[in-house]
Image (cartoon, rainbow, N blue to C red):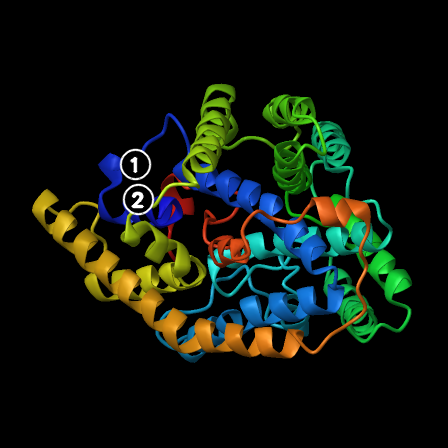
Amino acid sequence: MAVVAEHMLPWFIPQLRPYWFNIGVYGILVFFLVSGYIIPVSLERHGDVRAFWFSRFFRLYPLYLSVIVVVLALAWWVPVREAVPRDASAVAAHATMLLDVVGVGGVADTMWTLSYEMVFYLLVTALFLLRGHGHSGLLAMVFAGGAVVVGLVMSGAVMVGVWPAYVSFAVFAAGLACVITGRFRTAAACALGVMALLLLLLSSRVPWLGVAVVAVMFAGTAIHRWERGDGRLWPVAVTTALVVMAPLWAVTSGWWWVQGDVWLTTIALAGLTFAGGMALRGRRLPRVLTWLGTISYSLYLVHHPLLKYFVAVTGDLRKAALPVQIGMTVLVLALILAGSALTYRFVEKPMQELGRRLSGRGGDRLESPDDLRAQPEHARDDGILGQEEGQVPDGVRDHVGQSDALR
């Protein structure tokens, strides 16, 4: 909902948009902390990389592909954004979800963060098979320090052009086929992890931000290790300090939301939100909040196209009378929530159930004492996975002025 507000307010009630922190980046940071907290533990608990990837594919791709089809089908009315190449590299990049780390815009603006989710999945899979997944605190600090260094020395992607999309597609397809079937599994996972790391460092749109995002995700995992008694909390504090510093001297850092006070406030609020969530997680929450969590992936993918279509019908509302702005805001929120509930009910839920059935057919398991200690307290903790892809802002750019354009 924070990200819905980030995209909606500039076009519906711009005077309510906060500038003392960035509400969209705040959502991103909370989202990636939660994802980092949950994803490695899910893999470790099952001890089965085949089941993990089956669940990920059926969790992410059905709705993702459905939204792509709808956006392309309605391109005669609302054109596909210019950041999407008009060649086969766009197909290759969308097939892997590695959009932002191969320099390709998504057909729906919010799809860019899935790139960093996928990078994290590939890295965690390789670390798991190499039994190096227990060093989350160290990894968080390394990536956070890397974000500072990369920001100082890199102004943009080194690997440019269409070839990163094509090569990554080939490696992704072949590597995951091996990971899922079990043939050369560890070697394939390592190749995928190395590819993900190279793309993150050398082909991301804003390299320091991509590296910082992965640091935040490993910080989420480190918090889980600390909570279980398998790690310490001080690496999270070091990671936070480095992530705060990353944009301050970065070559590419001209956006208002990475100014020192705004960036620090945004990070602080995200950390407090995550801490509050941990403190309250043992309590019964209002049903409306758990419902929003359930439909949050649909909300994430559906809301921005719906906002575009709504604005295409109503026209520019930024200078409309306040009662009109409020009425249109209520209406578009109702449409977004209803649409998200429908896509969850008829796309997400049945495909997740199919994925669970297929992933239950077995696969090679890897267990170690570390894996056993990482077992969650509650058998249904995986339900949190349904909430993890829902908070993302519209790209890494200043939303003020012309860059606020929904088209």
Report which residue position mark 2 lands on. Answer: 10
Kindly check if marks 2 and 1 are in contact, taking CB atoms under 8 A apart as contact.
Answer: yes
Left or right of 245 in this view: 47? right
Quarter of the image where one finds residue 78: bottom left
Indicate the position of residue 323 as horizontal and vertical percent values: 8, 47
Residue count near mark 2 (Cα–Cα under 10 Å), binned few <14, some 14–19, many ≥20:
many
Mark 1: amino acid: Arg
Residue 118 sits in quarter: bottom right
Residue 109, can we see it? yes
Foreground residue, 398 or 384? 384
Nearest the eye: 315 or 228: 228
Amino acid type shown at disc 2: Pro
- Quadrant into which the C terminus falls: bottom left
Residue appearing at x 27%, y 66% in the figure: 338
Q: Secondary structure at mark 2?
A: helix
Compared across the picture, whether 46 is left or right of 111 comes to right
The number of numbered discs placed on residues in the rendered structure image is 2
Above or below residue 45? Residue 177 is below
Q: What separation in Å lies between label 2 and label 1 (alpha carbons)?
A: 7 Å
What residue did someone put label 1 on? 17
In this rendering, the answer to whether 345 lies above or below 33 is below
Q: Is residue 315 visible?
A: no
